[in-house]
Image: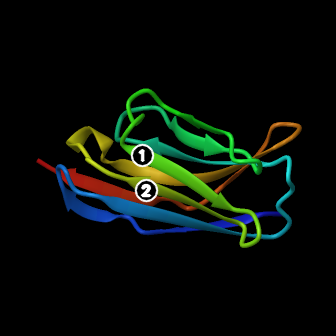
Amino acid sequence: QVQLVESGGGLVQAGGSLRLSCVASGQIFSSDVMGWYRQAPGKQRELVARISSGGSTGYADSVKGRFTISRDNAKNTVTLQMNSLKPEDSAVYYCNVLRIGLTNYWGQGTQVTVSS
């Protein structure tokens, strides 16, 4: 079983930055993909960024060039650095671990609010 705890959300003005962190407890395998999703009110949860244990990354088009995902395999942590934030980035951000066999683990979520 994997438990995920996020931190780092908050309120920031447009153009500002925030850094989200997620610590995973339990066994994390090298084949696990770690990532961040977000869900705004009235919208579906969407992928923001993901990273493999080898460092391969993928980003939603809406955040490319502004967000950077990183992973520390030794500490079982994944971080999302968010720069040049926009009001449309406001959402609850969820840490995720995707395991072979399509098992998903989710954190409790952290609120990010970007004011205009």
Query: Alpha-carbon neighbours of circle 1 within 10 Å: few (<14), some, or many (≥20)?
Result: many
The residue under label 1 is which amino acid type? Phe
Residue 97 on image: x %, y %: 71, 51
Is disc 2 placed on a helix, strand or loop?
Answer: strand
Q: Which of pointers 2 and 1 lies earlier in the amino acid sequence?
A: 1
Residue 23 on image: x %, y %: 64, 70
Query: Alpha-carbon neighbours of circle 2 within 10 Å: few (<14), some, or many (≥20)?
Result: some
- Horizontally, residue 43 falls left or right of residue 31, namely left
- Horizontally, residue 84 falls left or right of residue 30, namely left
Using the numbered discs, state the Cα–Cα distance from disc 2 to disc 1 in whole angstroms: 6 Å
Badge 2 vs badge 1, beta-carbon distance below 8 Å? yes
Specify how the rendered protein is coloured: rainbow
User: Up-down: is 80 above or below 104?
Assistant: below
The residue under label 2 is which amino acid type? Gln
Q: Which residue is mark 2?
A: 81
- Horizontally, residue 62 falls left or right of residue 35, namely left
Q: Residue at x 81, y 37 (%)?
A: 102
Residue 46 on image: x %, y %: 50, 34
Residue 32 on image: x %, y %: 80, 49
Q: Name the foreground residue: 53 vs 8.
A: 53
Furthest-left residue in this view: 116
Is disc 1 placed on a helix, strand or loop?
Answer: strand
Q: Name the foreground residue: 42 vs 10.
A: 10
Per the rendering, the mark at residue 67 is 1
Q: Residue at x 46, y 44 (%)?
A: 38
Furthest-top residue in this view: 61
